[in-house]
Amino acid sequence: MLHKISIISILLIITGVTAVFAQTPSAQTVAAVSADARDDRYRIGYQDVLNIQVFRHPELGIEATVNPNGMIYLFRLEEPIVAVCKTERELARDIENAYKVKYLKNPQVNVIVREQKSQAMSVIGAVEKPGKYFVSKRVHLLELIALAGGPNKESGTRVMVARTGSTSNCRMPDSVVSDDVTVLGFKMREIQEGKRMLWMQPGDIVSVLDADMVYVYGNVIKPGEVKFREPITLRQAIASSQGLKPATDKSVVRVLRQIPDSIERKELIYNLSEIDKGRGSDPYLEPNDIVAVSKDSTKAILNGVVTTFTNGLPTILSRGIPIP
């Protein structure tokens, strides 16, 4: 399932997102990285904190923060060095080359990213540790959910991923800049079984939804919501509502199902008597289905007569009135 929606609409679909992302720096500083960037190496982003050491020259060591222009400033160097979208090794090599020009013969530079503030991903909803996560390598959806402690006891069967675009602005040559948000839907079981492998991108918001619900109303003992984490059938939903009341019309059980991308619902009719006898399959319900169980009017009238007669029987007997 894939829909394109506006950046405002995503707040209506996934609630609880309170993190405010920093404004994107000027497009002039956005680097397009080469194809070899499609690997697992972490690429430096805006606001990352770097520890830079020069072998045998401790006086040149510095802890630098990548500024909004993607640059860092180093001792003795007149010009800033572009740091954003480079790996630690690539930046170290550029620093070595810069020092070679005037100051050092064979400099050896080591760069370590101390704080990764640019490539954040958020996990919200029914997980043990919701929050913002900074990762130093590529991770897929299952790994990110695991970092958040995994689904909690309130979780359901569905996971939504809102792809808002990279917060690091390290774009591939074929990338397209867009203000749209892409929303992708997954089933938790498919993720856990490795059937759906989504590589995460900076800025992604993962929402593990609460347990799904169907609604059972009408001639059942306990009408209302029925929560489920595993797929549920029509008979199971009715059983979860403590079963049918007397005088139920089992030949016509209606399921009202929402039409995708619409507020309208379609009506599906099932014969529960035939299903009970094994002559029809017990259909699986979908989240937010409404199950309507009707009374059999003929049976209801007969039951009413029997009830009235039964309730009046002690009075008839006490008065010695003969029963015809």
Image (cartoon, grey):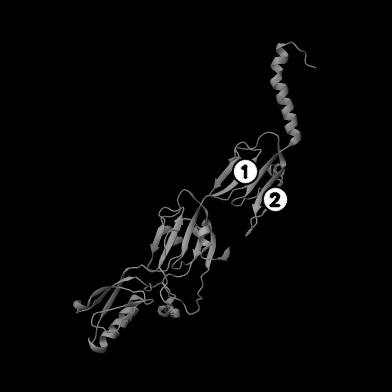
Viewport quadrant of the N terminus = bottom right
**In the rendered image, the vertical position of residue 108 relative to residue 10, given as above or below:** below
Density class for disc 1 (Cα within 10 Å; few <14, some 14-19, many ≥20) is many
Which numbered marker is on residue 57?
none
Outermost residue on the right side: it is 324
Point out residue 321 in the picture as x, y percentages from the top left corner. Answer: 76, 12
Point out residue 293 in the picture as x, y percentages from the top left corner. Answer: 67, 41
Provide the residue designation for mark 2.
268
Which residue is at a point 27% across and 76% down the rendered structure image? 110
Which numbered marker is on residue 216?
1
Amino acid type, label 2: Leu
Asked which quadrant contains residue 97, the reply is bottom left
Point out residue 65 in the picture as x, y percentages from the top left corner. Answer: 31, 72
Total number of numbered labels?
Answer: 2
Q: Secondary structure at mark 2?
A: strand
**In the rendered image, the vertical position of residue 324 relative to residue 10, given as above or below:** above
Outermost residue on the bottom side: it is 101
Viewport quadrant of the C terminus = top right
Which residue is at a point 63% across and 47% down the rendered structure image? 290
Q: In this image, 79 relative to 166: left or right?
A: left
Q: Secondary structure at mark 1?
A: strand
